[in-house]
Image (spheres, coloured by chain):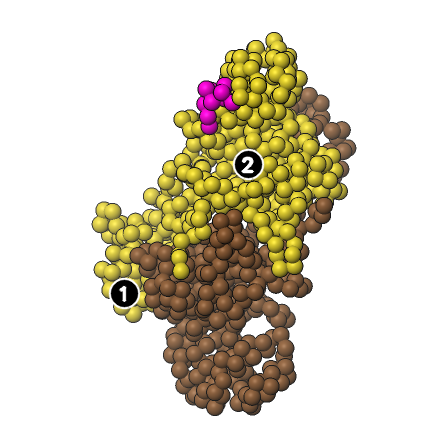
Chain colours: A brown, B yellow
Amino acid sequence: MTFQPPKGMRDLSGKDAEKLMRILQTCRNTFEKYGFVPLETPALESFEVLAAKGAGEAIKDEIYYFKDKSGRELGLRFDFTVPLARFVANNPNMPKPFRRYQIGPVWRYDNPQAKRWRQFYQADIDIVGSSSPLADAECIACVCEIMQKLGFSDFTVRVNSRIVLESLLERAGVTKTTDAIRIIDKIDKIGEDGVKKELKENGIDPKKTMKIIGMRGKSSLKELEKEKPAGLPELLDFLRCCESFGISGRIEPDASLARGMEYYTSLVFEIMLPQQKVSFGAGGRFDNLIKTLGGPDLPATGISLGVDRLLEEMGETKDDEKAFIATIGNVQDFAIAFTQKLRGNGIKCELELSNRNISKQLDYASKKYRYVAIIGEREAKAKKAKLRDMETGEEKLLKAEDLIKALKRR
Amino acid sequence: MTFQPPKGMRDLSGKDAEKLMRILQTCRNTFEKYGFVPLETPALESFEVLAAKGAGEAIKDEIYYFKDKSGRELGLRFDFTVPLARFVANNPNMPKPFRRYQIGPVWRYDNPQAKRWRQFYQADIDIVGSSSPLADAECIACVCEIMQKLGFSDFTVRVNSRIVLESLLERAGVTKTTDAIRIIDKIDKIGEDGVKKELKENGIDPKKTMKIIGMRGKSSLKELEKEKPAGLPELLDFLRCCESFGISGRIEPDASLARGMEYYTSLVFEIMLPQQKVSFGAGGRFDNLIKTLGGPDLPATGISLGVDRLLEEMGETKDDEKAFIATIGNVQDFAIAFTQKLRGNGIKCELELSNRNISKQLDYASKKYRYVAIIGEREAKAKKAKLRDMETGEEKLLKAEDLIKALKRR
C-alpha cells in the first residue's frame, strides 16, 4: 500500500499549512469587510453544468469526471465561477447585486508541472448584477489589500478589455480575431517569437498584431485614446474608479492580455509579481455566463486568487504567542489549570501528556517552541511556572498572569 | 439542464453560510489554542487506503469511488481519521505527540435522510503518539469549549471504554461479543425492544446484556468498581483528568456506548444535546489504525465535530458591524474614500455600485442591513454621511470616525 497522496496532489503540514491558514483567514476577513458574503456550493456538480458550452467546455478533459452509484454523471468543480453561475440560475430572485466569496479546493486533471497541482486552492469574489466598472475596481481593490496584508509589496495588476483587444485587431485588418486572441494569450508561455510563428501558421499577419501586443503600460493609454476602439469608455471609467480606490499605482494596462477562460466578455485582470511569468490571481467580466447556462441575463465580474502560488512566494509567518507546558512529578492538576488559564488569554499551548523525563520534553519542545513553561512540584506549590527561553536559555519564575504578559510583550 | 446541486448535497448561503463560517472559525481558533496544528490532506485518496481493513472496509459501499484518466482507483475521503493515519504512516519520523486539526467537507454515498447529507463538514482534532488518558480528556475539553462558544449550554459527553464493555459482556457469559456490541450500538436507532429482539435473533441472551446497557450515569461507576472489568483503570484515570479540566459535569459514563467505526479500540465519546438522538460529535482511541494500515505502531485518539448538525441546532449569529453605503448624485470619489475608511476600521461595508435612485437603494439595503450611510452631494461637501437606522428611521449626520464609533457601540 502506498502512503503518498494521489499523483499531482499533496499534504500540507507544518509551516506550509500554517501559511495556508493565514492566507485563507486574510482572504475571508478582507472579503467580508468589502461586503462579500459566504457561499458554499458542494465540491461535486453535475457534469452537464461543468462542461456546458460557455462554461468549462474548453477544459472538459481536465474535469475529474465520474458516475455515482445511481449512474448520475458528476464532476469535481474546476473553479468557483461556474458553480456560482449555477447557484444564481437556481435562485433567480435574490436581491442584486449579489456579492459572494468562496474559498476552497478545486480540481483539474492537468499534467502535473512544477508548482501546478491537481488539487489547488482558490479564493474567489464575484459581484453579480452590476455592470458598473466600479464593481470591477472594487474587486481589485479588495485583492490588492489582501496581497499587501500577506506581505507582498511589489505586485501589479495587468488589465485589459477583450472588447478593446478585438476592436483593435479588427481595425488592424485581422479577420480571425478569436484565433488571434487565443495565440496572443500564450505570449508569457511561448514568447514574442512563438506568438509570431503561430500567428503565421494560422494565416494571420504578425505585423498587424505585434503593434497591439506592444501596447503596455500607462503610456499606451494615449495611443488607445487616439485609436478609440470599442470598449475604451468602460476601460477608462474603470481606471478612474481605481484612482478613487488609491490603487492606480498598481494598475498596468496591457492590450495583449486576453485570459484563457472563454466566459470572459470585456474587462480582464491578472495579479503579477515581478520576474514571475505566472499570475497569482486573475479575473474579469463574465456578462454572458449565467444566461448561457440558462439562468437570468445578469452581468457579473469577479476575481480569483491562486492560493497555492501565494503560498509558494510568501515569507514565513510570524510566530504566534505559543508555549509548551512541561511537567515534572505529580503536578497534573495544577498544570492543567495553568494551561487553561494561558489558553483563556489567547496563548496557544501544548501540554505535556505523558510526564516524560524533562530532558526528553525539552528536546521535543525545542523543535517546535521558543518558550517552555516548566512546572515541577515546587513551582506548583508556589502557583507559578518557570518560563524558559529556549534560544537564550534564560529562565524566570512567573505567575500565570505575568507569564501571559511576558509572552505577549515579545 | 438542472441547477440543483447533486442529490444529497446542498448550497449553503445567507444566514446558514454565515453560521458555517462562524463554526469553522471558532473550531480553528480553539483548536490552535489547544496546541493543535493544521494539516491539509487532499480530498481524494487512493481507494486502497480508504477501504483498507481496519479503516473504511465496513463502509466501502458508501465511498465515492472512481478511476482517474490513468486508471488510478481513487475515492473521496469519508472522514479525516484515515487520511491522518495515512499521513503519519508516510511521515514516520515526525516528533511525537503529533496534534493536528483538519476541517472541511467529507463525502459518503449514504441514502439521503432528514438532516443527513452526502457532502458534510467535519472538524477534527487528533493526538498521535500518546496513550495517556490526558490526551483524550484534552480533546474533549477543547470540544466542550467550542460548544460553549457556539452558544450550546446543555450538552453532555457520553463516554465509555470498548474494553470495559467487552469485559462486562464476557463476564456476563456472552460469547459473541462483537455481534453483541454491534447490536447494542443501535440502541438510539431501534430502542431497547429492538435491541432485545436482534440479540435473540443472533442467539444472544438479552437478559445478560440488558443489565449492562442500563449502566448509565455517574452512579453506574460504583457498580463498575465492584465488577472491576478490564479497561476500568484507564476509564477512571480519564475521568480524573476531566475533573482537572473542570468538565466532569458534562461527562456521562454509559456502558452501552460502542460507536460504529471499527477502528476504535478503547475509550469512545459522543457529544449529545438533550432530546436529540443523534450525536453532534464523536471520537475515541484508535490505537491500532496506523499500524493496521502499515505505518508505525502508535497510539492515537481524537474527536470529530459534526458541523452540519451544529449548524442545524445553532441559534442566529449576532449581526456584525456592517453597513450599506448609499450614494446620491456625483459623489463617487468621496463615497469610495469614506467606505475604505470604514473598512479600515473593521466595519463590513457594501458600497452602492450603480447609483440607483435612493428609494431603490434603501429597499435593497433594508433586506440585508440595519444601518445605511447615505452620501449625497451636500454630505460629500461636508465630508460626512447620514447614518440611517432602518429599524427606527432615526438619522444622524456624522463624520467617518463618529460613524465608526456609533456602529461599534451598538
Q: Secondary structure at mark 2?
A: strand
Helix, strand or loop status at disc 1: loop
Q: Residue at 69% of width from left, 50% of height from top?
A: A4
Q: B399 or B49: which is nearer to us?
A: B49
**Vertical arrangement, residue B287 with respect to residue A158, above or below:** above
Q: Amino acid at mark 1?
A: Arg
Viewer-nearest residue: B62 or A33: B62
Residue furthest top in the image: B226
Q: Which residues are magenta?
A: B189-198
Magenta segment: does it hold A282? no
Picture coordinates of residue B167, whole percent (x, y) = 64, 17
- Marks 1/2: CA distance? 48 Å
Residue B276 at x, y percent in the picture: 42, 29
Nearer the observer: mark 1 or 2; the answer is 2
Seen from the viewer's position, the closer of residues B306 and B117 is: B117
Q: Residues within 10 Å of mark 2 (few under 14, many from 20)?
A: many
Q: Is residue B197 magenta?
A: yes
Which label is found at residue A98? none
Q: Chain of mark 2?
A: B
